[in-house]
Amino acid sequence: MQPAPSWDEAIDRHLALLATERGLARNSLEGYARDLADFARFCGDCGIEPRQLSASEINLYMQSLSARELAPSSQRRYLASLRGLVRSLVDDAHLAHDPTTAIKLRALPRPLPRILMPADIEALLRAIDTRGPRGLRDKAMLETAYGCGLRVSELVTLELAHLDLKDGTLITFGKGRKERMAPVGGAARRALQEYVAHGRPALLKGGKTSRWLFVGRRGRPLARQTFFRALKGWAALEPRLSWVSPHTLRHSFATHLLENGADLRAVQELLGHRDISTTQIYTHLSKRHLRQIYRAYHPRATLKSTV
């Protein structure tokens, strides 16, 4: 039998496997590390070693999360992180069976994401001052995020070499460094052409070079928080859009495609979802849109029934 690892050793090995076998991005690995460090502290306080772990100890941990008034969604995330670690312990023969299979949490209703209307996108674009290089960059980023359905992490790490303006395509790398090709629509293409021709060279002063498509003044890629703050600034001119976030653009991209007749499988590919069940949430949004159209335009949709 292999010597029993400490919690820190078990967690480090598990995270290394996630990085090498699943190719998880740094942000995802840091999230798992935070969740599992919290569990390791709980086990340390209770004197629980990896080989002593059972369903009763995990239930105690889940109760402690509830006592800390963590949201049910956060509790589920902690449990999901813990399940991965426990599977690694079972695979390495440090546990005879997986005690997390006995842990059941109440299913949570999945909230429908809020989306923007096409007029809202136009309002955000009007809020950008395109008279300078930064404005040309920001307009190109907004058009690309919405027009290609990119995650904000994908948007800010786009490389110039992965953009083909002539062909109207770009290559991006999603979760797990999964590569996908995204078509670039006419509006995004025009904004990118203007930015690449005039905005980007002005931002890269002194003949600097950069591999990144969207750059700051030093040629470095923008942080996700930079785009978030910029989006909030544009939305500030439209108080009804104060709730908007970068991921709202991705939700709107998918919903607008389905509302206009796109196939669910095609939308799955465009979003880079591994499982189509992740994409299916947008069918609920699309059905809601169809109901609204029906009620607004069908002559008998709003007639009250009589008994």
Image: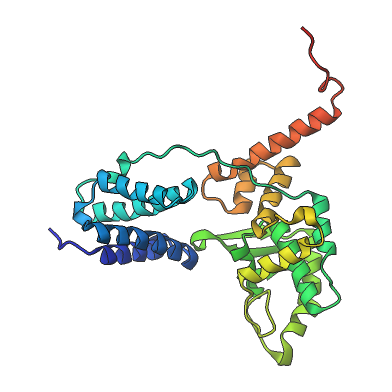
| Relative height, residue 110 to residue 133 (above, below) | above
Front in this rendered view, residue 259 or 95: 95
> Can residue 141 be seen here?
yes
> Can residue 167 be seen here?
no
Where residue 141 sits in the image (x, y, percent)? 72, 67
In the image, what residue occupies the spot 84% across and 25% down?
Answer: 298
**Seen in the image, is 164 located left or right of residue 69?**
right
Where residue 71 sits in the image (x, y, percent)? 49, 49
**Seen in the image, is 41 located left or right of residue 193?**
left
In the image, what residue occupies the spot 82% across and 68% down?
Answer: 128
Report the coloring of the rendering. Answer: rainbow
| Relative height, residue 305 to residue 130 (above, below) | above
In the displayed orientation, state which residue is furthest to the bottom.
206
Quadrant in the picture for residue 186: bottom right
| Relative height, residue 93 to residue 97 (above, below) | below
**Seen in the image, is 17 located left or right of residue 50?**
right
| Relative height, residue 302 to residue 277 (above, below) | above
Front in this rendered view, residue 208 or 133: 133
Where residue 259 sits in the image (x, y, percent)? 74, 41
Front in this rendered view, residue 53 or 96: 53
Where's the C terminus, which quadrant?
top right
In the image, what residue occupies the spot 84% across and 71% down?
Answer: 129
Front in this rendered view, residue 29 or 104: 104
In the displayed orientation, state which residue is furthest to the left.
1
In the image, what residue occupies the spot 76% across and 54% down?
Answer: 241
In the displayed orientation, state which residue is furthest to the top.
307
Where residue 142 sits in the image (x, y, percent)? 74, 63
Quadrant in the picture for residue 32: bottom left
Quadrant in the picture for residue 156: bottom right
